[in-house]
Amino acid sequence: MLTVGLTGGIGAGKSEVSRLLASYGAVLIDADRISREVVEPGTEGLAAVVAEFGERILRPDGTLDRPALGAIVFGDEDRRKALNAIMHPLVGRRAAELQQAAGPDDIVLHDVPLLTENGLAGRYDQVVVVDADPATQLDRLVRLRGMTEDDARARIAAQATREQRLALATFVIDNDGPLEALEPQVRAVWDRLREQR
């Protein structure tokens, strides 16, 4: 089994790279998807988050109001740390379960947005960084996700720097260009990963 950590700044195009690698045969473990799963209604995760932040972070149907929670923790380091102290062990435990279910010859791809920020590079055999110029990230966040420019800049600034991510990379995929320029790069990385399995 080869474990691969995939990361990239917000708006860099990591999700598309993740999708392509999964289509080639990688076993995908998506930290964002797991982070939603562990706070579904009835889970210990949701109960712990509500105990920490109060019922105001719940929607009327009992599901987590992610924007409301984000408004509390974004920009408040202590509240963000409190949330991370709840979430990281839950996400880590579920990711480990999924990895254990993979086969010995599989390439297990961990899609981890905050890999750099949380010092997780050492957990993986290889690290793939999807890289884009901050101006490209800004444009995508405003044009494709509908963020205000100020909000987009704040989100980019809250993450690790481009240089910090690149320093951890085994492989770098440049995603400044059009989508059609991405696939050949991802395929080349996949071929290299298969050689190392």
Image (spheres, rainbow, N blue to C red):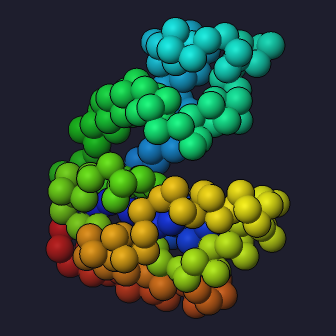
Q: Quadrant of residue 84?
A: top left
Query: Which quadrant of the figure contains the N terminus?
Result: bottom left
Query: Where's the C terminus, which quadrant?
Result: bottom left
Q: Nearer the viewer, residue 169 or 78?
A: 78
- Residue 184: give x, y in percent of width and height: 49, 88
Counting from the top left corner in percent of width and height, residue 72 is at 62, 31
Residue lying at 28% horizontally and 42% vertically, measured from the top left: 99
Give the total of numbered labels. Answer: 0
Residue occupying image coordinates x 71% and y 15%:
56
Q: Can see residue 1? A: no
Instruction: Please tell me which residue is depicted at 76% across the width and 66% down the height of the picture.
Output: 149
Q: Position of residue 96 (x, y in %)?
A: 27, 37
Give 108 or 48, whichever is nearer the viewer: 48
The answer to whether 160 is drawn above or below residue 190 in the figure is above
16 up-or-down from 39: above or below: below
Determine whether 102 is above or below 124 in the image. above
**Quadrant in which residue 74 is drawn:** top right
Query: Does 65 appear above or below 150?
Result: above
Work out whether residue 111 can be spotted: yes
Q: Residue at x 26, y 52 (%)?
A: 120
Q: Is residue 173 left or right of residue 66?
A: left
Residue 123 horizontal/vertical position (percent): 20, 52
Quadrant of the rendered image containing residue 6? bottom left
